[in-house]
Image (cartoon, helix red, strand yellow):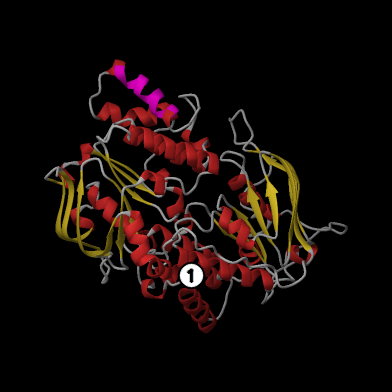
Amino acid sequence: MDTHVRLEGFGWRHAGRRAWAVRGVDLAVTRGERVLVLGPSGAGKSTLLAALAGLLAEDSGEQEGVVTVDGVDARAARERVGIVFQDPQTQLVMSRVGDDVAFGLENRGVPPGQIWPAVDAALEAVGLNLPRDRSTAALSGGEQQRLALAGAIALRPSLLLLDEPTANLDPAGATMVRDAVRRVLADRRTTLILVEHRVADVLHMIDRVVVLRSGGAVVADGSPESVFAAHGDALAEDGVWIPGRPVLPRRAGTPAGEVLLWARGVGYRHPEQPEPALDPTDGRVRRGRALAVLGPNGSGKTTLALLLGGLLEPTTGAVVAAPALADGSLTAPPLARRVRRRPGDPAMAPHRWPAAALTQRIGSVFQNPEHQFLANRVDEELALGPRRLGRRPAEIRSTVDDLLGRLRLDRLAAANPHTLSGGERRRLSVATALATAPPVIILDEPTFGQDRRTWIELVDLLAKLRDDGCAVVAATHDADFVDTLADGVLRLGA
């Protein structure tokens, strides 16, 4: 057989870390195979893909073993490999859509007359019907993900590596991407190695399943049928989303409380952009309830999350806080200096609050976790919010230790947040929002990158917060999350 990819005793340890991200991996993949890599969050799946793409720099960690593509060290075979990361923004290098796809083609020396037809074909293949001059900064997260895929397939690589390529896409967009990948792979000239938590969505695309255990090493390898028949129960226990194992709903255990936030015709338009990022929208956020914000990519879910969180000033309408939220009486301990309101004002707009007040009253979790990290250690990142609010050192330590344990981050307390896996970064971003115990928490794609076990733990945590009286808002494409936790739905772009 024509061995296309080989790993022998592969291991990688990030600089400054004691534990290996992945270790002892032996794997051979033949040309044209379609391989799904599974394993619990933190098992090293993304690190394995980065190694195959030749992206693990020698000065950024320690490598063991051999990694080759077509018999060549992976670092010397980068031009044969296309990769799409969990976070597409790390791959977007140009300010316009067409230029971003063309960038790789130009670097490869493709003749100028062939570049733009290749760009247009790649954009069409991923269902991104946008002008070439559209600003990449104005794209939604899902649109950015499709653009990154277009840049990868435009190069017609012999090895295509996909790290959860549809995680931020609405169902229609996810189907477009999977169909695009199938078309690229139809002639069997391109080898696919795919990391994806939601197995059922990609079973039709793959020939083989490889399972990594936490910390590395292959524990199962074979056809999907044989692997799931022999290891299905153990895989589900380890966090793999095995088909046919649904999660039971977490219904609200307490009555709905008062409205804490109103969206009253709230909308937003980016400066110099012809179309609004969010059309005028109405909605209510109640204590003791979980509200799911749904809609196709580009409908404004992320924008609404930023508006409700007081991180963006509306250009139309208003976000209005209830008096008890606006004056700080819902927070404990209360702020020494509460927001003053004019006589007759029923509430305040959150975007006008001081940073300390906003942090204590509304917690926000961004779509891209690394955008909110400020410290160089996980435990220090969790301590920032409580410390800024003047909490006592013993209280801060207790809060940090509790969150580290509840979100399975305790072994990573001393790690740099930017070296965590995608799922670990997401859990850390949720933990930082919870560290100040706000009565409202707003999350953008909260379950992105989670294996089944950590997904359930995260949903259970949010369910408890809701039942304890917190108002939870989640912008999401995750239908399982909606079915399991949401008490109400706000649809955008309908």
Residue 178, image x and y in percent? 43, 40
Front-most of residues 36 and 305: 36
Residue 452 to residue 278: above or below? below
Identify the residue at image location x=26%, y=44%: 33
Can residue 93 be seen here? The reply is no
Residue 162, image x and y in percent? 35, 46
Predominant SS of the magenta segment: helix
Q: Amino acid at mark 1?
A: Leu
Residue 156, image x and y in percent? 28, 32
Identify the residue at image location x=54%, y=39%: 172
Query: Which residue corresponds to mark 1?
Result: 382
Can residue 177 be seen here? The reply is yes
Residue 64 included in the magenta stretch of the image? no
Identify the residue at image location x=47%, y=36%: 176
Magenta stretch? 114-124
Residue 233 to residue 132: above or below? below
Residue 171's quadrant in the figure?
A: top right
Q: Quadrant of the C terminus?
A: top right
Residue 19 to residue 346: above or below? below
Q: Quadrant of the N terminus?
A: top left
Residue 470's quadrant in the figure?
A: bottom right
- Classify residue 404 as left or right of residue 411: right
Q: Residue reaching furthest top?
A: 113
Q: Secondary structure at mark 1?
A: helix
